Image (tube, rainbow, N blue to C red):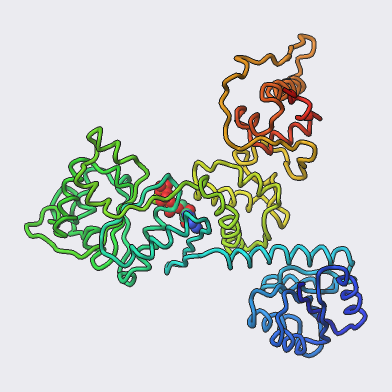
Amino acid sequence: MFKVLVVDDDSDLRLSVASALSEGNYSVDQASNGEEAVNRVRAGRYNLVLLDVNMPQMTGLEALREIKAHDPSIIVIVLTAFSNVRDAVDATRNGAYNYLEKPIKADNLVYMVDKALKAHNMVRSVSLAAPVFRLQNGQDFVGQSNEMKRIFSVIDKLSQVETAVLIRGESGTGKELVAQALHFNSPRKDNRFVTVNCSAIPENLIESEFFGHEKGAFTGADQRKIGKFQYADGGTLFLDEIGDISAAMQVKLLRALQTKRFTPVGANREIEVDVRIVAATNRNLEEMIRTGHFREDLFYRLNVLPILLPPLRQRKNDIEHLVRHFIEKFNQQHGKNISGVSEAAMDLIVSHSWPGNIRELENVIEHAFVIESRDEIQSSSLPASVSGSHGEDADGVTEAGLEDADGILPESLEGAPLSIETGFRLDINHLDFQANKEEFERQFLISALKAFNGRINQTAMHANIPKKTLLRKLEKYGIRAREYSRQD
Ligand SMILES: Nc1ncnc2c1ncn2[C@@H]1O[C@H](COP(=O)(O)OP(=O)(O)OP(=O)(O)O)[C@@H](O)[C@H]1O
Ligand SMILES: [Mg+2]
């Protein structure tokens, strides 16, 4: 049961709002002015407040401020006369969820209240269920899968020791974020976190980048320069893309790691530093050792405490939460008020394989964010790589009548026909490309379904087409998968 407070000086309006909401899962209280509203909110836990903007004494905007100050999670929907829409827009900038124009239509009211509470409930359950690491630099590290919970606890432990850590994982899995989390949770957090991107520095400059140089050490060295090792003294040095450093640098780096000492280029004395080393790579270092491209001794020096970040496709539990996290982030950045993602869009997002991992997810959400005109991200706003739709809209697809009982595991092709007749014939008198493409698609789908016994998952997998897209296409062509299952 959600607790709703209706605030308006017009008692008829309060009654009609209360009666419109009486059929839902709400308990509705009333207040006739801003002050009473604020007192009630302070005294009891409300989920949502419907607030008139134009009231005598305390205005709606003032009440809004007080309510939000008391509990920022309370949803406030502003009620406004048409002539006051400006105030309502102001209110949404100050934390109101949305506004409703008077006279209030019961349908609109119920719809908006339902939706607001649904979105809100999601945020709440997510924030209760999911641990979030807030780094001191303001970054949030999000994850609720068992894999990520385990990594959070590893980070907790490893941040308290001085030993080198090697973070491994595919591109975009959050390796740099882990490195930051290690630093900002460690006793070194008030000193610097310094990143060296080993793959981005030209070979002739890398030694100076690491260790610094004296004035005149080489052509162009017109000033003395402090290297990253020294700059990170007392803090953490993050060696990103460590798999990309040259053989010559590997030797020098190993020596610096072993002795905590190094000699700047062109200098004749050693410098001693106190740095904690965290390294990261997405390369297969064991294979590089085997082929002679990475030193085994350096590997063991760095790999004392390894952290392996699983790819996003192996922790799909995190996707919904990450999506919410990025939506909140972009709402702030772009000054929008997107409430979430449609169910169909979320299905597509969850079933995508995310080869670019979290970075790809973040980019996809930002892309959708920028082009979405509604207040919820729809499938049509997702890039084609995720929706598989190449511009078509997947919302509203139902699976009714298309249920498939097969498992998710791939089935071998053993026993399947070697080739499939599609029955597609090109009529020389009807060469229209679009019409033929559709006919080909239809025949293709029927033939593929026949080959896989009418099973949706198998067909989708072997044809390399997202299941949702397949279902949508079957619906478009009126194909019933069930009709192609052999009863053997
Ligand atoms: N668990 C997470 N919670 C929130 N944001 C995340 C999470 N993991 C990654 N990100 C975000 O995804 C993006 C990619 O992360 P990061 O740069 O740490 O990946 P990486 O593994 O270092 O990638 P690469 O190998 O390509 O350098 C960043 O913007 C980061 O903030
Ligand atoms: Mg990185």
Q: Is residue 395 left or right of residue 110?
A: left
Extreme left residue here? 268
The residue that appears at 40% across and 53% down in the rendered structure is: 175
Q: Which is nearer the eye, 178 or 209? A: 178
Q: Is residue 16 left or right of residue 285?
A: right
Quadrant (top left/top right/bottom left/bottom right) for the C terminus: top right
Residue 257 position by quadrant: bottom left
Residue 87 position by quadrant: bottom right
Q: Residue 334, percent across and down?
A: 60, 60
Q: Residue 25, percent across and down?
A: 81, 69
Q: Residue 179, percent across and down?
A: 36, 58
Q: Is residue 412 above or below residue 378?
A: above
The residue that appears at 40% across and 58% down in the rendered structure is: 178
The residue that appears at 73% across and 54% down in the rendered structure is: 374
Q: Is residue 371 left or right of residue 154?
A: right
The residue that appears at 17% across and 42% down in the rendered structure is: 248
